[in-house]
Image (cartoon, rainbow, N blue to C red):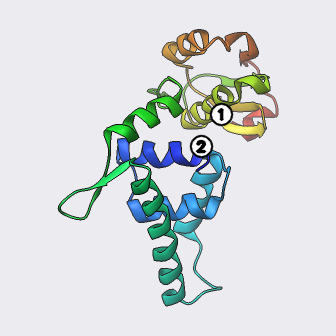
């Protein structure tokens, strides 16, 4: 299995953030090699789009089949275990794999104070060799309530957490990130 999909699946089991069926369905719909933002998009899409193309029975049958295959692969690899109440938990091998895939990246959620203060622009140009760190950065910025203007330019309001800046420095990508506070927003008021 591709690292990002496996990472998200193990992360889900580790954090227990979404219902198992919805998450695995989103992972499978996102496809092989999809990033975390694509998986999140698929998850949100599944929540709000009515099933116009397939009947409910066909959709459930297909979802169960795909889920069974994915779970079977994870069980075969020893990454998850089934408890006595038919629930899945991450195994010790799964936790080790999750830690390796996580690559010691910091948490993606920081306490945020949105809607206060001047507009902030965060722009970055993180090299391809730091792709996982760049993906982490995008996810953190989104979680802080910023809106994407361009792939690497984000606008929002609120203070940027000091812990976030420290984590950028610890990850050795702070040099690729610029954070601007705008005192006269002009047309940015429409975006922020």
- The residue lying furthest to the left in this view is 84
In space, the residues marked 1 and 2 are separated at their CA atoms by: 10 Å
Whether 67 is drawn above or below 127: the answer is: below
Whether 3 is drawn above or below 50: the answer is: above
68 or 109: nearer the viewer: 68
Residue drawn where x is 56% and y is 57% of the image: 27
Mark 2 surroundings: few (<14), some (14-19) or many (≥20) residues within 10 A: some
**Residue 51 image position (x, y, % from top left):** 58, 81
- The numbered disc on residue 135 is 1
Q: Quadrant of residue 99?
A: top left
Q: Is residue 44 visible?
A: no
Q: Quadrant of residue 20?
A: bottom left
Residue drawn where x is 17% and y is 61% of the image: 84
- Would residue 100 be found to the left or right of residue 155 on screen? left
**Residue 128 image position (x, y, % from top left):** 78, 27
Residue drawn where x is 46% and y is 64% of the image: 22
Disc 1 is placed on an element classified as helix
- Would residue 64 be found to the left or right of residue 82 on screen? right
Q: Is residue 58 visible?
A: yes
Whether 151 is drawn above or below 89: the answer is: above
Disc 2 is placed on an element classified as helix
188 or 34: nearer the viewer: 34
The residue wearing badge 2 is 4
* Tag 1 and tag 2, C-beta contact below 8 Å: yes
Q: Nearer the viewer, mark 1 or mark 2?
A: 2
Mark 1 surroundings: few (<14), some (14-19) or many (≥20) residues within 10 A: some
- The numbered disc on residue 124 is none
């Amino acid at each position: 299995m591709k690292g990002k999909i496996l990472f998200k699946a193990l992360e889900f089991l580790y954090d227990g953030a979404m219902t198992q069926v919805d998450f695995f369905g989103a992972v499978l719909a996102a496809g092989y090699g999809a990033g975390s933002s694509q998986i999140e998009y698929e998850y949100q899409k599944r929540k709000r789009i009515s099933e116009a193309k397939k009947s409910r029975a066909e959709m459930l049958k297909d979802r169960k089949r795909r889920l069974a295959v994915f779970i079977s692969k994870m069980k075969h690899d020893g990454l998850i275990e089934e408890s006595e109440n038919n629930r899945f938990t991450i195994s010790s091998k799964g936790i080790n794999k999750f830690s390796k895939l996580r690559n010691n990246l910091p948490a993606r959620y920081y306490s945020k104070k949105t809607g206060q203060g001047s507009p902030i622009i965060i722009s970055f140009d993180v090299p391809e060799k730091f792709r996982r760190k760049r993906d982490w950065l995008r996810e953190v910025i989104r979680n802080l309530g910023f809106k994407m203007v361009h792939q690497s330019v984000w606008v929002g309001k609120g203070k940027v957490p000091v812990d976030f800046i420290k984590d950028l420095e610890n990850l050795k990508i702070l040099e690729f990130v610029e954070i601007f506070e705008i005192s006269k927003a002009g047309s940015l008021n429409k975006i922020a």
